[in-house]
Image (cartoon, coloured by chain):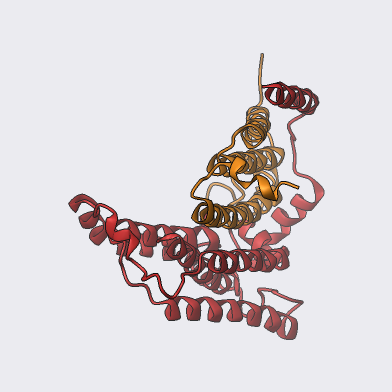
Chain colours: A orange, B red
Amino acid sequence: MYLPVSAIVLTSGLALVLIGLWVMLIRKNLIRMILGFSLIDTGTHMVIVSLGYVTGGTAPILDQAVGTVDAVSKVVDPVPSALVLTAIVIGLGVTAVMLSYAVRLYDQKKSLSIDDCAESKW
Amino acid sequence: MIKRYFVLFILLLLGMMLLQVVQSYHEHTRLGSLATRYVGEGPKELGAANIVTAVVVTYRGLDTLGEVTVLFISAAGVGLLLRRRKEEAPGEPSDLRTPASELVRTAMDLLFPMVLLLGIYIFINGHLTPGGGFQGGAVMASGVMLLFLALPQAPVSHTLLSLTESLSGFGYVLIGVLGVLLAGGFLDNRIMGLGRYGTLFSAGAIPLIYILIGLKVGTELSSVLERFRR
């Protein structure tokens, strides 16, 4: 069976999202939950990039190989790449804030388990 | 245990839903209308060889300004959450750590300037090659990370970091406003000549904006790393 390369990236991106959700819902350790978030983040990036792929296209950077005249028929969609660039930076910022919350919680409770934060559950 | 099966069940349902997305997926064979406009007109209009850069810095420049703002706010949040008490001397707890090995320290001496230089190269050439301000800034911050690994007590000037960050952020907005006054709109890169297409001094204000973004992201990520060093 022939599988286009973008379909493989799409499938593995969605699989990463599912694995990340599993990690976030099952694990008790705060660091592992943040890792689960990062997996979802990465999976989403892969999905967005794969949706911008055009069969046989190359990177949207023009040089000797891809001239300005025939660029439209040779390159992939630049908009999803630009969106993912934004998404990576936002994901990094969110992860940094979550990790510093984890550091603060560890300072107070001397534990990284979510069960030790039960008083803030409801 | 019952919770584990419940989660598995939910994820299975979600997976079945996503499977239908994958099954109905067809690879595009040509660009959509928006992308055709960007790729076809972008090089002529803005003079940038890297279309992704043209989209990030000019066509969607306002989004990038928002993105830089989000990064700034998260750096400020990390700084607020991990601020040091006055009584705890910075560096006292890390004395318990084993010092970095000879190998790491020697590699740091050799690599630190080169990593910074590579970061600068990446953001200066953002309009010609893969890369740009965010990537170059992240590479520079990875150099700072190496510095902290080798010398956990390395002195870092907060004044210099926050001054560079504020000035480059201010310069970015200033260039945006100049775009309104001198060219077609906010963050328009045609406030200066487009130069010869494909050379370093081309694409109007794009290299200038990417230098400022690179400096801002590099110093912001460095100060985040500095906060996590305890």
Left/right of residue A29 with respect to residue B85 in the rendered view = right
The residue furthest bottom is B181
The residue furthest left is B102
Pick the residue in front: B24 or B202: B24
Q: Which residue occupies 70% across, 74% down?
A: B188
Q: Which residue occupies 34% across, 60% down?
A: B93
From this viewpoint, is residue A58 visible? no
The x and y percentages for residue B25 are 77, 29
Pick the residue in front: B14 or B111: B14
Q: Which residue occupies 57% across, 44% down?
A: A30
Asked if residue A48 is positioned above or below residue A56 in the image, the reply reads below
The x and y percentages for residue B131 are 52, 56
Asked if residue A120 is positioned above or below residue A7 in the image, the reply reads below
Quarter residue A35 falls in: top right
Q: Which residue occupies 71% across, 51% down?
A: A79
Pick the residue in front: B201 or B141: B141
Quarter residue A23 falls in: top right
From this viewpoint, is residue A116 visible? yes
The quadrant the C terminus of chain B occupies is: bottom left
Asked if residue A85 is positioned above or below residue B155 in the image, the reply reads above
The x and y percentages for residue B27 are 73, 31
